[in-house]
Every structure is written in C-alpha cells, then in structure tokens.
Image (tube, grey):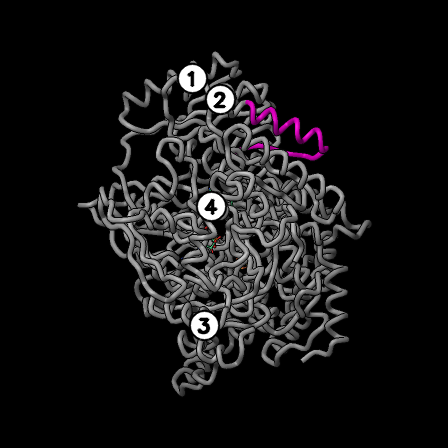
C-alpha cells in the first residue's frame, strides 16, 4: 500500500513526464483492440487493451484514479509488442507512452523479489557488459557440455524451477565455448568491390547465446557484396532496460552506441534482432530532449536497417537458394514489423528458396508472447498467447518456423517443446536458414 | 448504490470472475468513443447466458439500479457512458455465431459477436451481410442493432434495421420475449423487432438476433472521382441518384480529411484536390461495367478533374480501409475531434455541404467533412481542443446551427450514430414535443423504473451541449 503522499508524487511525476497531447490523440475508437494479444487472450478485458491502458494513464494524470496495483497490473500485462500502433488511425505513439509510464512507476516502487533479482543482475550486471555476458554463456556452455545438464534433468532437479523457466532452460541453444567466442575481426572486407559499407550491430544476447547466427549474418552480408565493420566498443541496445522502466540506463547505452557507430561512416547499421533494431531506430525519441545528442541520434537512427532489408536491396533473393523439400512459415518479430515496418523482405527471401513451400500462418503478425522477460514475469498470459500461436503454427503443417529475433526464436522453440513436437518441427533464425539455403546444393 | 447484499447477489448469479468493481475496471468502462464523456459505473458485470441476464435485470429493477448494456464501446453519442452510475453489462460471453441457415439465408448470432467476424463467416459460405459500419472490425452486432448502424454499403443495401429479422430480448421486467422470425412476411401485431432496433439499450437487452443475408454479388468495381471544389462533388451525388443509378457506395471526403487519411494509410490518395467521391458498384459483371461508365461520365460532366478505376481488389480494399479510418485519423490534427451525423435527403446534399462551410466560417471553427454522401449522411467533424472552453462554446453553437439547417432541409439530427446522451438535447428539433412524448410513453410502459440505460435519448435538462466533462 502506498501512502497518499506517495500517490501524490507519482501523479505529479506522471503529469510532468507523460505527453498529454499524445494521450489525447487517442480518440477511443477501439480500432486497436482486435490487434492486441492481451485484450484477446484475457477474454476481451478493456483494462488489458491499448485503449484501456491509455485511458488509465490519462486518468492517473487527471487524478481520476490512483496508481494502484490494478493499474500497474494492466501496464505490466502489456507485451509492449506495439501491434496497436500501425492499426491506430490517429497515430498514437503507444510505445513511447508505455515506456514513460513504466519508467515513472519503476522509479517509485519496490519490485517483487523475482523481478528484482532478474532485473538487477540482468540490467546492471549483465547486459551492459559484453564480457560478463560471455561468462554467463560460458557457464551455460559448461553446464550443457559437462553432463551437468543431463544430471540435472535426470534427477528432475529442474522441476524445482517454475514450469516455464525449466522449459526455457531446455530450449536454450548450445552456446559456444569461450574459446569459440574468441574475438572476431572488427573489419571484414568485401569479396570484390564493396556495394555497400555496413556496420554490424551484434547485440548482446545475439552475440553470445546466438553467436552462430551472428557469424552467419556476417557471411551473408559478405556474400551480398558488403564490406563490414564491427565496432568493438558497441554496447547493448538498451531495449530491455527501457521496456522495463530503466530508462536512464538505456540512455547511457544509446550514447555509447552512437559514439561507437557514428565515426564509421557506414551506409547502414545492420541488425539481425527485431527487438534491438526497433530500439536503435528509436534513439532519436529516447534522446530528443538532450540537445547535445538529439541530432546525432537522428543521424544514427536513419542508418538502421534489418538484415533482411539489405539482403533484398542487394538482390540476395535472386541468387540460387536451395533447401530440402519442406513447408516453412514465418513468425513476424513484433518490433521488426510494427516499429521497423519490415515485413515483406523476410517473406520475399523465404519465398525465393527453391523446393520450399512457404505458407503464411494465420496471425503471423501477432506477438508470440516472448516480449523480453515477459515470458518469465507474466508466465500465465505469455503461455496463453503461445498456445494460441501454436494452434496456428500447426495449421500450416510447416516443419520449419522462421523467426527474426532471438526472443521469438526461443519462444517458438518453447512452443514446440510444450507441444511435444521437437522431433518434427524446428525453429530457426532467418539468417541461419538463408545460409543453409546458400550452402546446400 | 450497490449494497453489499446486492453485490453478493450479483456475484452469486454470475460468479466472482464475472463481477468486477475494482477502480480500474470502473475506469475503463467509464467511456466510449464520444469525446469528453466519462462517468464511472458502480460495477461491471458479464453474464454468461440469457437466464443470468434476466435475473440481473430483475434484481436491478427491484433496486432501481441502472443497467448500461455495452458492446465494444465504439458508439459516438455517449450511449454507453454510465452517466447515472449503475452496472455496465458486458456481452463477452455472448460471442457465438449460432447458425448460418443456407436455406433461409439467415444467420443467428449472440450480441457480442464482432461484426466483421460474422461478415467473414457468412462470406465463407458465399453469403453476404451488407451493413458494414466503419468500425466493423471491433463493433458488436448488439451495438449495431441498438444504434441501427449504417455503413459504406448503405446506399444500395440499407442499414442494420433492414437486416434484422428476429430478436430475443430481455425486458426490464426480466421477461424474455422473441420478436419476428425467419420470415419474409410477418404482420402479427406491432413490429417490435423494429422498435428494438435503434433503441440504444433503453428498452431491453438483446440476447440473440437473427439477421437476413443476401447472395454474394458476382462482381464489384471501385473508383475515385477527384474534384477541385466541394460543390461539384456534391452535385455529382445528387445527379447520380437523379439518373436512377444506385451505386453500392458513394462516399465523400474533403481535402482536409484526405490529407489525414493519407498520412495514416499511405496509399497515394490525392491530397491536392478539394474533394473526392469514392464510388463502388456491385452485381452482374455487365451491369456493373455499364453503370461504372455512366457514373464516370456523370462525374466528368460535373467537373471531376479525373476519374480513376481501382485496378485490383487490393487497391479497392485499401481505398475502403482508408475511408473507414477517416474519423480516427482526424485525431492526428487536434486533441479533440467532435463528429456529427446530420442527414438530409439526397437531393439536398449540395446545399448542406455549402451550409456547413458557411456555419464553420460564421463561428470560426475548423470543420472537415466526409461521409456517406449517397445516403445524404454527412459527418461534419470539428477539430478542436476540449480544454479551450471558449472555442468549445462556438463549436456547440455551430453544431446547433448545423442540426437546425439539416432539419430545415427535411433531414434529421442523426443518421446512424444515435441520440444517446450527446444529441438528447436536440431531439425536439426533429420530433417536436408530441413526438418526444410518444416515445417517452413507450419507454415508460416498458421500463417504468427507468433502469435501462437512463439519461439516453431523452434529455434530463434542456441545456444544449455537445461536450460534458465528467
Ligand atoms: C471510427 C469509428 C467509425 C464509425 N463508423 C460508423 C459507421 O460507419 N456507421 C455507423 O453507423 N456507426 C459508426 N460508428 C459508431 C459505432 O461504431 C456504431 O454505433 C456501432 O454499432 C457500436 O457498436 P459497439 O459494439 O461498439 O456498441 P456500443 O458502443 O458498446 O453500444 C452502442 C449502443 O448499443 C447498446 N447495446 C450494445 N449491446 C446491446 C445489447 N446486447 N442489448 C441492448 N443494448 C445494447 C448500448 O447500450 C449503446 O446504447 C463508428 C465509430 C467509430 C469510433
Ligand atoms: S486505435 Fe488509436 S485512437 Fe483508436 S482507441 Fe486505439 S489508440 Fe486510441
Ligand atoms: S503493445 Fe501489444 S500488448 Fe501492449 S497494448 Fe499494444 S498491442 Fe496490446
């Protein structure tokens, strides 16, 4: 319970920080409701809809409601998938409002123990530090290779973990050894004359747990005719921070990245994780009130491009691409789709692979429920969303589910695991699949 | 107003999970799509079947507790704003399509079914449900019936009323009645079905509806006619009807509307013209092609600068979708968009367009206009800021003038959005005292305790206002 004094402070901060004009832009037409996974999965509860959440934010500002646990629950339950944005004719920037609201709340409250520990260790101890990410991955790798994992499963000790954590643990990729993770070159020349000079944003999760995918990305860029610069001083994008109300941390990371990339004079900054890309592309908003950084951030964001976009731009889909005969489908990454507005390119690439039948999945554009650490802190809703997703996956009869973001990839793997389909369906990152298609004859 | 006893009784009826009186749920059911109306209910209740609805109604009737039935809350007349408190009644458990009868060409649904879901389900069987309010991807059938909603296809096919064959209604007494049937003809007594259509939840609660379907038209064509002045566009509308052609769709958008819609939809709409008409025709291929030729030549005679036919169904669909987003897209321009719904006979549409512009000038307010021109149903939309009290006063005056002018031209104050709370003060313009008395007599006899959506349709006070804050 918060005291009325505390309530007053929060309300005051809401008033100061939230963009009221933006909130008033919402004319409450409800056009966003059917696009919102939490509205649908909650059985059409207005408090779990974008319109409801915006109304609650406005009500806190207006003093019509206190920021009680139910208001917080409504905001916590939001996936931050931003599916409500492209469908909003009024152009309400929901994502920005949510971020601001969450950050304000965060600054005023004490988190539950689980969330607190996950956050603290993740946000300040882990993600900002590439070497620490590596040691965590190193630990995972040791755990997987040493037989400890087997023993853990055998003794069913993993059952002590909450249901989804233990399943998540099962679907984690085999991580590279520390040796395999030895630093890669910071420059990869083009095969012949470079068609484009690109800088690669390797991400933190991507560069450790999904290092192979990053290596594949570099190879594809090279095949497509790029010269590639990989600045060593780049940092985590800050998305996980900002989406969980750690905005100041996110700003610091943004500045580090701007410094690392702006000097490279690259045509594009390439990402292969929709979640990171969408956050990088939002740096101009994040730093808009910082006069020293606003312009630099704007220039930075103009260079951001997803790997699938540059591949299509450089006609990669016109190369010969083969795979074994199979049905594949694609699950959009919410942020790639709704924020980076990239949805055709992955499909163009996938449809260009010989022997493969591409089948569009019903509601491919709807969130899979992964959403950062959402699947750990809001398990129930996340699993509901995932189960609905798997129904649509099965409908396509696809044996390969293609994704474009590490969180989605893990969540789809989790879905396959939960359905007991690990023997017949696989989930892959689009980059890995494309490399496979380039190599196989 | 809801005592612990009543609360317990309600929970006993519907289960804890379907009764909510938390502050959050009261807040998120305190509004609809009408700007600046907000008022908290005492609780939110989601019955699971009609028997529960009947029990709730009886309980509320005994204790004089207002009931506000609510679909998706997209109405534009403050029809679901709980201005008198009471309980908001949700239909989330009433979301089944019960039957598609291919022999009688009917569909039977529960009121919580989303309009577009139903349209898709019947189209999958080669059948067609024409009423398509722009909000159809989220509006419910219960809401459509109670507002008697129209849509883009209204010109040729009519509005919701023309498709409602039978209703199951829980009366304020708790009795359940069945009106109409799967019948092409039925004159057994008063036409209660029509009475409940457009009743805005003030006479009873619809728990089931049987709707008429028609065969899917074989062919469809869509075109856009561009104009350098509003009047020519409006004249084209009257001329088309006078030439005895009834297109499916005949929509009007002015330049300001085009600009915001294009900003959202980004489909290359012309933003350098003063107005466009979106015209569609459906039916047998030869007839459609012939009609489209005639339509194009009428538009050209009326000074259209160009007439473009959509080349694919995708292109046509993006034009329709863009048109449907018009109202919400306006919100991009100003914090508050207040939309009206005045309707005149088709022949008077050009005069009405001119009058709207004159009135906007007179009160110095910013009004954009779009709407179902072919139906004579325009949506003059005022872009304003509810925080600017002085301007809001002028907006109210302008709307009053628009209503008066519409009625003068033989029209009405609302064509499809309903009276609700918002237009209640103006109802007398259309009906006169005797008309209102007749309606009140009906209300009084069915709902003597005034529990069903009170303060809607009939004004409590006479102060005319378009905007009320809390
Ligand atoms: C952007 C936008 C575009 C729109 N376009 C159109 C359009 O083209 N044409 C048009 O006609 N309207 C339009 N509307 C208005 C609105 O969408 C319609 O009135 C729609 O029918 C309302 O449906 P709903 O489910 O949201 O109903 P609600 O708004 O929830 O309710 C509407 C009324 O029905 C009553 N009600 C709901 N369910 C029941 C029930 N089961 N029993 C008894 N009473 C009930 C409510 O009490 C209320 O009076 C538009 C609205 C918006 C925001
Ligand atoms: S679509 Fe946009 S304007 Fe409409 S309710 Fe949702 S956020 Fe508000
Ligand atoms: S971000 Fe996603 S979950 Fe959150 S309100 Fe928007 S659509 Fe719903």
Q: Where on the picture, by quarter, is residue B360?
A: top right
Foreground label between 3 and 2: 3
Q: Chain of mark 2?
A: B
Q: In the picture provided, is B202 more to the left or to the right than A425? A: right
| Measured Cα–Cα span from mark 2 to mark 4 | 24 Å
| Measured Cα–Cα span from mark 3 to mark 1 | 61 Å
The magenta span reads: B351-371
Residues packed near mark 4 inside 10 Å, few (<14), some (14 to 19) or many (20 plus): many
- Pick whichever of labels 2 and 4 is earlier in the sequence: 4
- Pick whichever of labels 4 and 3 is earlier in the sequence: 3
Residues packed near mark 3 inside 10 Å, few (<14), some (14 to 19) or many (20 plus): few
Q: Where on the picture, by quarter, is residue B153?
A: top left
- Pick whichever of labels 1 and 4 is earlier in the sequence: 4
Q: Residue at x 30, y 63 (%)?
A: A424
Q: Chain of mark 3?
A: B
Q: Position of residue A144 (x, y in %)?
A: 47, 76
Give SS at disc 3: helix
Q: Which residue is mark 1?
A: B296
Is residue B350 magenta-colored? no
Foreground label between 3 and 1: 3
- Pick whichever of labels 1 and 2 is earlier in the sequence: 2
Q: Is residue B289 visible?
A: yes
Q: Which residue is mark 3?
A: B62
């Amino acid at each position: 319970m918060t005291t009325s004094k505390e309530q007053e402070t929060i309300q005051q901060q809401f008033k100061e920080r939230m963009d009221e004009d933006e909130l008033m832009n919402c004319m409450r037409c409800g056009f966003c409701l059917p696009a919102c996974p939490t509205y649908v999965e909650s059985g059409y509860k207005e408090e779990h809809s974008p319109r409801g959440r915006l109304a609650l934010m406005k009500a806190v500002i207006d003093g019509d409601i206190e920021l009680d646990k139910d208001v917080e629950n409504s905001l916590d339950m939001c996936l931050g998938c931003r599916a409500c944005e492209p469908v909003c004719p009024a152009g309400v920037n929901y994502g920005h409002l949510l971020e601001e609201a969450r950050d304000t709340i965060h600054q005023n409250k004490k988190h539950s123990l689980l969330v607190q520990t996950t956050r603290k260790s993740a946000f300040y101890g882990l993600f900002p530090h590439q070497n620490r990410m590596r040691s965590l991955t190193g630990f995972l790798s040791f755990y997987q290779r040493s037989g400890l994992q087997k023993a853990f499963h055998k003794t069913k000790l993993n059952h002590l973990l909450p249901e989804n954590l233990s399943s998540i643990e099962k679907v984690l990729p085999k991580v590279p050894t520390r040796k395999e993770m030895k630093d890669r070159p910071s420059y990869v020349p083009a095969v012949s004359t470079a068609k484009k000079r690109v800088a690669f944003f390797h991400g933190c999760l991507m560069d450790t747990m999904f290092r192979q995918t990053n290596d594949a990305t570099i190879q594809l860029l090279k095949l497509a005719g790029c010269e590639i610069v990989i600045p060593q001083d780049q940092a985590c994008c800050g998305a996980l921070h900002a989406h969980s109300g750690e905005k100041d941390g996110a700003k610091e990371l943004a500045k580090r990245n701007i410094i690392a990339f702006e000097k490279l004079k690259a045509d594009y900054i390439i990402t292969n994780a929709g979640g990171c890309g969408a956050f990088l592309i939002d740096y101009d908003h994040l730093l808009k009130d910082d006069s020293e950084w606003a312009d630099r951030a704007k220039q930075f964001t103009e260079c951001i491009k997803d790997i699938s976009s540059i591949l299509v731009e450089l006609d990669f889909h016109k190369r010969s691409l083969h795979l074994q005969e199979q049905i594949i489908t694609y699950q959009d990454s919410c942020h790639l789709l709704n924020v980076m507005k990239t949805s055709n390119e992955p499909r163009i690439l996938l449809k260009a692979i010989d022997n493969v039948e591409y089948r569009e999945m019903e509601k491919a554009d709807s969130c899979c429920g992964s959403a950062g650490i959402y699947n750990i802190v809001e398990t129930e809703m996340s699993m509901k969303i995932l189960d609905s997703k798997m129904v649509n996956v099965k409908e396509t009869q696809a044996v390969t589910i293609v994704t474009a973001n590490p969180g989605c990839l893990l969540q789809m793997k989790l879905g396959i695991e939960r359905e007991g389909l690990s023997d017949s369906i696989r989930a892959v990152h689009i980059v890995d699949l494309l490399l496979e298609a380039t190599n196989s004859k | 107003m809801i005592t612990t006893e009543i609360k317990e009784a309600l929970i006993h009826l519907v289960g804890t999970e379907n009764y909510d009186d938390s502050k959050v749920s009261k807040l998120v059911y305190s509004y609809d799509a009408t700007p600046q109306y907000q008022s908290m209910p005492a609780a939110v209740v989601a019955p699971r079947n009609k028997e529960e609805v009947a029990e709730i109604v009886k309980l509320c009737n005994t204790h004089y507790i207002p009931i506000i039935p609510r679909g998706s809350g997209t109405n534009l007349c403050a029809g679901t704003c709980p201005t008198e408190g009471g309980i908001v009644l949700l239909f989330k458990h009433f979301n089944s399509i019960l039957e598609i009868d291919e022999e009688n060409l009917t569909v039977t649904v529960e009121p919580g079914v989303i309009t577009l879901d139903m349209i898709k389900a019947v189209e999958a069987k080669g059948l067609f449900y024409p009423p398509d309010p722009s909000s159809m991807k989220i509006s419910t059938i219960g809401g459509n019936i109670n507002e008697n909603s129209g849509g883009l296809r209204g010109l040729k096919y009519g509005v919701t009323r023309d498709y409602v064959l039978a209703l199951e209604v829980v009366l304020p007494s708790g009795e359940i009645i069945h009106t109409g049937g799967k019948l092409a003809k039925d004159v057994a007594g008063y036409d209660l079905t029509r009475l409940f259509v457009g009743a805005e939840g003030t006479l009873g609660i619809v728990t089931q509806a049987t709707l008429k379907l028609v065969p899917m038209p074989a062919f469809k064509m869509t075109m856009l006619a561009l104009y350098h002045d509003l009047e020519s566009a409006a004249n084209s509308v009257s001329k088309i009807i006078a030439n005895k052609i009834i297109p499916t769709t005949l929509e009007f958008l002015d330049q300001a509307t085009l600009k915001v819609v294009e900003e959202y939809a980004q489909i290359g709409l012309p933003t350098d013209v003063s107005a466009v008409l979106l015209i569609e025709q459906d039916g047998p291929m030869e007839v459609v092609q012939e009609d489209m030729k005639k339509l194009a030549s009428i538009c050209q005679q009326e000074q259209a600068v160009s007439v473009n036919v959509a080349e694919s169904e995708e292109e046509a669909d993006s034009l329709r979708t863009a048109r449907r987003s018009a109202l919400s897209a306006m919100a991009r321009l100003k914090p508050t968009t207040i939309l009206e719904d005045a309707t005149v006979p088709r022949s008077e549409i050009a005069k009405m367009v001119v009058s709207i512009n004159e009135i906007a000038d007179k009160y110095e307010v910013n009004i954009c206009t779009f709407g179902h021109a072919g139906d004579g149903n325009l949506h003059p939309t005022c872009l304003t800021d509810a925080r600017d009290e002085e301007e809001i006063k002028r907006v109210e005056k302008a709307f009053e003038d628009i209503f008066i002018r519409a009625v003068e031209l033989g029209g009405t104050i609302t064509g499809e959005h309903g009276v609700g709370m918002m237009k209640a003060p103006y109802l007398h313009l259309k009906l006169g005292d005797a008309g209102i008395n007749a309606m009140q007599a009906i209300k009084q006899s069915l709902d003597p305790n005034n529990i069903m959506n009170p303060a809607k349709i009939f004004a409590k006070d006479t102060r005319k206002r378009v905007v009320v804050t809390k």
